Image (cartoon, rainbow, N blue to C red):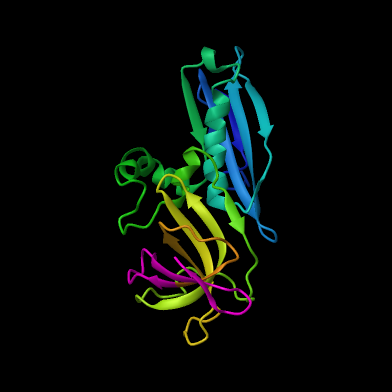
Amino acid sequence: MDAILSPDNKKKQKGSSERTIALRDNALNIFTDGSSLPHPRRGGIGIRFVTTDAAGDAVVDERCLPGYASATNNQMELMACIKALEMAHDHPTLEAVKEVWIYTDSMYVTENVLNAMFAWPKSKWMNRSGRPVEKGVLNKALRITTVRRKRTDQSVQVASVKMEGQTMSVRIITDTYMRTQKLYKYMYEVLSESSRYFGKSDYIYSEMLLRAGHHYEVRVNSTPDNPRIVEVLNEIDRISGAVVGNQ
């Protein structure tokens, strides 16, 4: 059986920068890779279909697909596998093989595939602490996100704003609807100057719809592992700071 070099495997043989992988005969072997770049953040995927012909030689079919704006590395690794399986349905060699094998160097994908198959669907795509499994929606498509620029130059840091049941004024930077969990995910920055978190940006979830670029007075929960907006008290005028209406 011949072998193929897989450049997306990080584990190396001694004296080599690549790892040799033996192809499975009578199978559609699929090698996937996903990655993302910053400034601005965008992602891309690569897919390689490999089969063996009657002589035992490798037949390679490489596919390059359009990229995705604002995508993370894990999202692209997942999307690469999803697109590969979708494309495998129409691959000309599918009827002639008995198995389909996917090879990925993503620990996130390999460590969570059983969770995605058995555990997360039963928990409505929530983890043990009740926090949404965000990438669960990738079994359909990448989420649609509305984005506004941050006002501060501080980077977004997860869990930088502690959930203490406090009330604070916030500006919504991005609003993302998570269809599987029927929740909204928000990137926000704290506007309350009296708060020790003033100027910090973080992520939070809610069942209530808020709009990117708008300012709100909200009350949050007290669960650090599952940050939630539990009540929207008011929308605040972005210029005057006055209350413009009750939610």
Taking depth in this image into account, of 231 and 110 the one nearest to the observer is 231
Residue at the image position 35 percent from the left and 76 percent from the top = 164
In magenta segment, residue 232 = yes
Q: In this rendering, does residue 12 appear at all?
A: no
Taking depth in this image into account, of 160 and 222 the one nearest to the observer is 222
98 over 147 or under it: above or below: above
Q: In the rendered view, does 49 fall on the left or right side of 204?
A: right
Q: Find residue 36 and report its horizontal and vertical position in percent.
A: 63, 52
Taking depth in this image into account, of 174 and 36 the one nearest to the observer is 174
100 over 71 or under it: above or below: above
220 over 56 or under it: above or below: below
The number of discs equals 0
Residue at the image position 67 percent from the left and 59 percent from the top = 38
Q: Find residue 44 and report its horizontal and vertical position in percent.
A: 65, 45
Quadrant where the image shows the N terminus: top right
**Over which residues does the magenta segment extend?**
218-247
Residue at the image position 55 percent from the left and 69 percent from the top = 156
In magenta segment, residue 237 = yes
71 over 214 or under it: above or below: above
Q: Quadrant of residue 33?
A: top right
Q: Find residue 25 and report its horizontal and vertical position in percent.
A: 51, 20
